[in-house]
Amino acid sequence: MRRIPVFLLLTAGLMSAKWYQVKVPLNQGITVHDLGDFDVVNLKPGFEAEIVVTESELDKLTEQGIPYTVVIDDMETYYESRMSGTSPFGDYYTCTEAYAILDSLHEKYPDIISERMVLPNDDFDDLTWDGNYVYAVKISDNVDVEEDEPEVLYTGLHHAREPITVNICVEWARWLCECYTTDPLVTYLVNNRQIWMIPIVNPDGYLYNESTFPAGGGMHRKNRNPAGYPNRGVDINRNYPYMWGLDDQGSSPNPQSQTYRGSAPGSEPETQSVMNLCKEHEFVAAINFHSHADLFIPPWGYRSGACEDSVAIYNWGEACTRQNLYGVTPDGLGYRTNGDATDWMYGDTEVKSRIFPATVEVGDEFWQEYAVKEHVAENFPLLIATAKAAGPYLELKKAGWVDENGNGNISPGETLNLVLGIYNMNLRDETGGINVELEGEDSRIELLTSSASIPSIGPQQSSLIQTDIQVKVLTAAPVDSAIAFDLILTAAGHEYVHTVILPVGDRELLINEDFDDQNCEGWYATGDWGFTNSYSHSRSYSMTDSPFSTYPDSGSSYFRSPKLDLSEYVFAEFSFWHRGSLQKGRDWGIFEVKESADAEWKPLKHWSGSMDAWQEEHFDLTRFCGTEEFQMRFRLYADTATQVLDGWYLDDIELAAFRGKVTTGGISELTDIRPMLGPLEGLTKGNLYFSGPEGTEVKVEVFDASGRRVAQVAGITPFSWQMSDLKGIRLPRGIYFVNTISPSRQTARKIVLTD
């Protein structure tokens, strides 16, 4: 074990360097690869980079002939002056505060959150250089048991000057604990995942910043390895073994550098602690939180180009960033890193199983205290999407109907087919076959076919399919009425229960705009939005953000709908066509909605990059039915990077809705997620494993192909049973139908028994 004397720690504090944020042009023969010794905090490829440097590093830039402009003269003083001063670190959690919150959660919820666990390392008697520990916590329904459930990992504070990452991890733990049993999604995730967090990977560096700048604003980045005095330490996120030291652009061999990779791969106690946890568990997904840049960064860091699972990981990133609008960068940051945690988690498959990871860069500055609550809140959808992605999870994207007349209206006497759009959130595995059940009794309809099967959906892929489920609307059914059904999707041993609506009546077009009359009554635009005949999807005109030139380099402008009264509608669908050219990962076209005049705008989807051909988008807006002041807008956001791109074009905007009233249930609402009741196997040599809510008493009846009951058994879930007849003799091979009956529900499943 190696320890650093306290007097050296204090001496280092007295001699801490002054930090600057400077801007370096990248259009004067200088590339970002010339800046490998520095922490790049903002990059506009081909234009400029902003980096963090010390006074001695400013001299180095001058010696190398690299021009720069100082953006922030003294970063620690700058950040300290912006802190609230109401407590140490303001609204950021200190090391002591973070651990105290986790300890209190364990005391209050001991069944679902573990106590803090020391993560062992290999060479330091489980301690860090300054004698601290790296801790982790686990959240799961049987927290003391290592269950056969998908595992997911979240890490914070690899770098000591990135305090928002601590708050995000701690508040995620708090939310899971406090909402367990009351929120169906949280309950599902805690019951069906093993959720791990390392909120502070680098306790030494964090405590050092606390000791030198107790009000907040400390700029120390690395751990506290004595190498590199007075800018001591190793960059933990350049110390992982995978591609360690590949070159001197992605990390530095210089101990004084902020990106110093250490003396050997995996040399640091903190690195070893994270690696050991990953080796002991089979994490499917992981998020490594950093700050700052508002980016979601998949592998690879050490080279350009996409990784093997880039499509699934990119789609996961898009799902994660629907709300916070972080850029998903499939080709990395634009500069190289080697020896980082994300590359090691994905790339090293010799000492552990492959993990699907991403680096998430939060916010616009290291110490941005006024935005702490905003940054935590905007990352909750990302945290949830990652927990979903670690294992089985189906998202219902669309539930609609195809009428036999083909006119879009749903009329009494018509027969309808159910159309479903389903997204497989799982990062690693296919869904397997999906069983669909529609349940409901109503005097206005006849349920002709209540079940259907959907083929397996690949990882992070979607399927839009017209199912075999058929409903006949009886001739006596009144128009402008609505019928609620329970829709049950079953896959991978779980049931996802939704309430869906069948509207009866005429399909009304509330918005039908092709822009050819160059008159959008009730719509409002800011900036340069206007009509153009440069491109159109149909006829002659479309709408664009910049009709006469390229779009502005910075700022935000929008094209907004009038207020729409949806209070008498029960079903709504929206579609539009678009194309465009936006700076990838930096500028965005965003579709947003809000439910009332006082509500905040909610982004439903965003786009970036080039779309050379017109493409159609569909949105199920049924969940907004019942509101009186619903609005939509198309917003163009651009950062400050210079560009000469054409912008965003819209055409053929259509909002269709059905009138009616529904008295039970929600609308396209997820009402329950539960273990599948019944046998998990569809093909077996005789043994059946019965799942369901734990402790449920069930009765099982087995029928042969002729409908004759040949076996029965009772048990309490979960349990297993060897298929045998009423006399205890093993059933012969063949096809059987197994009914599983509980006090609250009943299921039936076909089983093939083999030799």
Image (spheres, grey):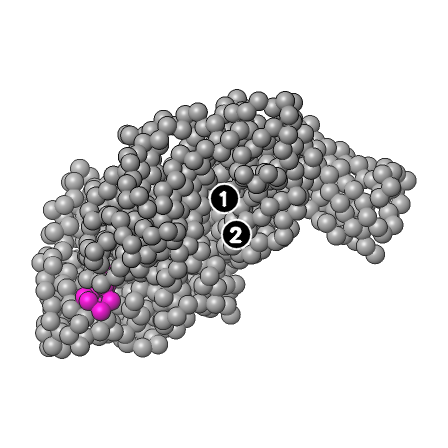
The amino acid type found where label 2 is placed reads Ser
Tell me what residue is drawn at x 18 percent, y 66 percent: 48
Near mark 2 (Cα within 10 A), the count class, few <14, some 14-19 or many ≥20, is some
According to the picture, the residue beneath numbered tag 1 turns out to be 397
Q: Which residues are magenta?
A: 38-49
**Residue 462 circle label:** 2
Does residue 664 lie above or below 532 as drawn? above
Does residue 223 lie above or below 542 as drawn? below
Question: What's the CA distance linking mark 2 and mark 1?
Answer: 9 Å
**Residue 137 circle label:** none
Tell me what residue is drawn at x 59 percent, y 32 percent: 486
* Picture coordinates of residue 92, whole percent (x, y): 25, 44
Magenta-span inclusion, residue 51? no
Tell me what residue is drawn at x 52 percent, y 52 percent: 462
Q: Is residue 124 visible?
A: no
SS label for mark 2: strand
Q: Are marks 2 and 1 in contact (CB under 8 Å)?
A: yes
Tell me what residue is drawn at x 50 percent, y 54 percent: 460
